[in-house]
Structure formats: structure tokens, C-alpha cells
Amino acid sequence: MKFQSVPRHVAIIMDGNGRWANKRNLPRIAGHRAGVENIRTLVSSAAEIGIECLTVFAFSSENWRRPPLEVRLLMDLFIMALEQEAERLHANKVRLRIIGNRTEFPAKLQEAIAAAETLTRSNGGLTLVIAANYGGHWDLTQAARTLAEQVRAGNLRVDEISSELVQQHLSASDLPPPDLFIRSGGEQRISNFLLWQLAYTEFYFTDCLWPDFDRLEFERALTSYAQRQRRFGMTGEQVAHGVETVAPPQG
């Protein structure tokens, strides 16, 4: 399918793995495994359609509150997925980025992340961003701390702090903000995901559970996006008459 308007950057909360497994009388980790398998399909579809960047929310800073066994199994699954998929991503010229506080991960997982990022760093195809141990509050807090340190050191004046400067210190600041946000699983909230970056993003919610979110479901979301009028603070008449719609600075 060809789309009249293709988003440069799509961000996704992959919700519903556990419920998908429960409906089939399977352990929750089976749903997470199915969800990981589905990322491969999505990456292939996004690259084929011409999307430049795909960001998926894999593990939030709040997910540590889950049962310890589930957290441990998720860490093991993350390591396995990185080790199995890094070469495949590299062969398909996909660049992998991990955003979030990786210092809290087991050493083996940190090593797998570093190896996969290094392997794919120079690739020029789709950029796949995995948000792991990530939270929007954490992202903004670490940016604020960095700027505060610069002020304390005398390298920055308070009146020099701007929204553009804050943006430069956020995770993946070199990437464009998401044009389209998708959440599967029926929930309609952003759950501390990319709080700053989603300011002017178009939202799409679906009841489809993540392991069932196939190419057709993805195309439905992209079709919805293509029908939106993005105004960025202007009027609909301005957009209709061809006034250039440039997203304002984040913040």
C-alpha cells in the first residue's frame, strides 16, 4: 500500500503481551516472546514503507515493580533477542539505538546492548530505537541535572536555557520527534513515554493486542495518520492554502 503521507518517525507502546498469553492459557512470558517476534515483522514493514525511525517501548522504569520472576525472564529475553537479532539487523542496514538508564541492567545485558549498537552504528537504513528502563520523567530529569551542572560550573547562564537546549540533552536528541504514536492493547494513555517528544505527535489507539498487531493493523494506523491535518498551532485555512507547516520547538 502507498500512503499519501508517511511519518518519518513512529513511536509504539507494545501493550497486550500478557493478556494475549492469558487468553491462550499460556504463561505471560510466552506473550512477551510472541511480542518480540512481532517486532521483526514491524521493522521489516516500516523499512519497506519508508519510515526513517521506529521507537518501541520495551521496558519502562516502572516495570521493575512487576513480579521478580517476570522481570528476570524479561531480562533474559532481552539478552537473547539482542544476540539473535543483531546480525539480522546489521544485514538489513538497520541502526539500533537503546535509550534509557542501562546502568541498572545486569552486566551481561549491558554488554549485549553495547555490542549490538557498535555492530549497527554505521548503518544507513531504518533507525530502530528500543526504550528500555526508560521513562519520560527520567529523561527530563537527567537533562535538567546536566544543565544544572553546567550552570554550577559557570559554563552556562540560567537565561541561556531554552527549549532547544533542553531538547539537545534528551535521549536520542539527534532524531526527529515522533510524527505518529501507536498504542496497542486498548489502553489510551502514554504511560510516561517520550513526554517531551510527543508534544505535537498524532495519536492512534487500537484494541489489538501486540502479538496480533500485524502489517494490516500497521497500515490502518498509517492510513489514519495520512488523513490527519497537522497544523502545529496554525489554522486549518493556513494549512489548506499551503502555508509551510513546520513543527515548533519541543517545549
Image (tube, grey):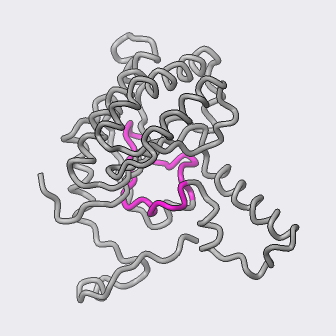
112 left or right of 149 in image: left
Please give the count of numbered marks on the rendered protein: 0
Q: Residue at x 64, y 53 (%)?
A: 139
Q: Read off the magenta span.
A: 172-195
Q: Is residue 76 above or below residue 85?
A: above
Q: Residue at x 50, y 26 (%)?
A: 78
130 left or right of 43 in image: right
Q: Position of residue 199 (x, y in %)?
A: 50, 65
Q: Residue at x 35, y 52 (%)?
A: 124
Give yes or no for residue 134 being in the magenta stretch: no
Which quarter of the figure has residue 173? bottom right
Q: Position of residue 219 (x, y in %)?
A: 21, 48
Could you tell me what secondary structure mostly forms the magenta stretch? loop
Q: Is residue 7 above or below residue 64?
A: below
Q: Position of residue 194 (x, y in %)?
A: 54, 54
44 left or right of 26 in image: left
129 left or right of 226 in image: right
Front residue (pair 36, 240)? 36
